[in-house]
Image: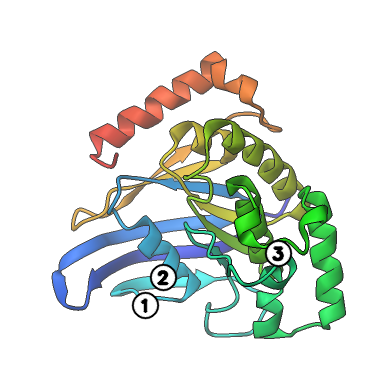
Amino acid sequence: MLITETLTIRGLAYSYAHSPQSSVFADLSMHIHQGEFISIVGASGCGKSTLFKIIAGLLEPTSGEIDFHSDVSNSTRLGQIAYMPQQDLLLPWRTVMDNCLLPWELKRVRSKQESIAQIRGMLQRLGLAELENAYPQELSGGMKQRVAFLRTLVAGGNLMLLDEPFGALDAMTKRGMHKWLLELWSELDKTVLFITHDLEEALLLSDRIYLMTGGTAGGIQEFIVDLPRPRHYKQNYEPRFIALREDLERRLYENHTY
C-alpha cells in the first residue's frame, strides 16, 4: 500500500514578536501520513494551539518549513485546512443549518442547494437531523461540539485540526463522542491532528502521539500506539493499553511536558 505524506514540518520555531528571546517552541519536526489520526499532548503553554494556528496559516513561524501536500495548486495553507478551535464558536443568532453554512458562504465552491443537502446528510449521520432549525442555546454541550465538527467538515480539506474538541464535556458524553468520531473518521478517510490533555483519549483515538515540550529546549517526541483497530473502551482495561498509558505518562513527566 502506498503511504503518502499529507504534512511535513521541519525545524519549526515560534517566538512572540515583542519578545523574540522568549521561544514558544523550537526545532519542531514531524511528518503526518494520509489517513492517520495523530494526537498532540503536552503541558499547557507548550505551544500546541499555536502550532495549529501556524499549520492552518493563521500565524507565520519564526523559522522552519511546512510542506502541506494538497491537490489544490495554492501556495498558501489558509483556507485549505479545516480547523476546529477549543470553543465551538457557534453564532448564537444562527440556526444549526445556518452555522454549518458559514464555510459555504466564505468559499461558494458549489451551489447552496448542494451544500444544504450535504449538511442534512451529515446531520442525519450525527444524530442531529431534528435540530436543523435549533439555535445553539437549545443544544447540549455534546450537540454543540457535533455541530462545530460538522461545520469543520463542510469547510473541506483532507487535513483536519481539532483543538481539544471534547475538553469541556463530561466523561459519559466524551465517551459517546469518541465512538462516533472514530466511526466517522474511518468512513471519511480524513487525516486528523488532535490536541488533548487526556492520555487515555489520545491512546484510544490515535495511530501515533507527539509529545511537545515547548520553550527553547524545543523538540517533539513520537510515541507509536500499536493497538488494533477498531478501538473500543474495553481496551482501556487490557494489559497492553495500561502499559502504553504508563509509558506515555512516564515520558511526559521525564520531559517535563505534562
Q: Do the numbered discs 1 and 2 sit on residues whose CB atoms are within 8 Å?
A: yes
Q: Nearer the viewer, residue 20 or 149?
A: 149
Residue flagged by tag 2: what amino acid is it? Ile
**35 on left or right of 169:** right
Q: Amino acid at mark 1?
A: Glu
| Occupied quadrant, residue 178 | top right
Front position in the image: 140 or 122: 140
Say how the picture is coloured. Answer: rainbow
For marks 3 and 2, give the CA distance: 29 Å
Q: CA distance from mark 1 to mark 3?
A: 32 Å
Q: Earlier in the sequence, mark 1 or mark 3?
A: 1
Asked if 102 appears above or below 134 in the picture, the reply is: below
Compared with 67, 138 (above or below) is above
How far from the left and from the top, in percent, is residue 86? 47, 57
Judged from the image, the secondary structure of the residue bearing numbered disc 2 is helix
Name the amino acid, label 3: Val
Instruction: Between residue 256 and residue 175, name the one nearer to us.
Output: 175
* Percent coordinates x, y for residue 125 in the rendering: 81, 50
Residue 208 visible somewhere in the drawing: yes
Crowd around label 3: few <14 · some 14–19 · many ≥20 (10 Å): many
Q: Residue 233, how many percent across, how many down? A: 62, 25
Query: Is 30 on the left or on the right of 219, as rendered?
Result: right
Q: Secondary structure at mark 1?
A: loop
Residue for badge 1: 60
Q: How packed is label 2: few (under 14 Cα within 10 Å), some, or many (20 or more)?
A: some
Residue 96 has which mark?
3
Q: Position of residue 94 (x, y in %)?
A: 65, 71
The CA span between labels 1 and 2 is: 6 Å
Seen at 44% across and 37% down, the residue is: 198
Which residue does the numbered mark 2 point to in the structure image? Answer: 54
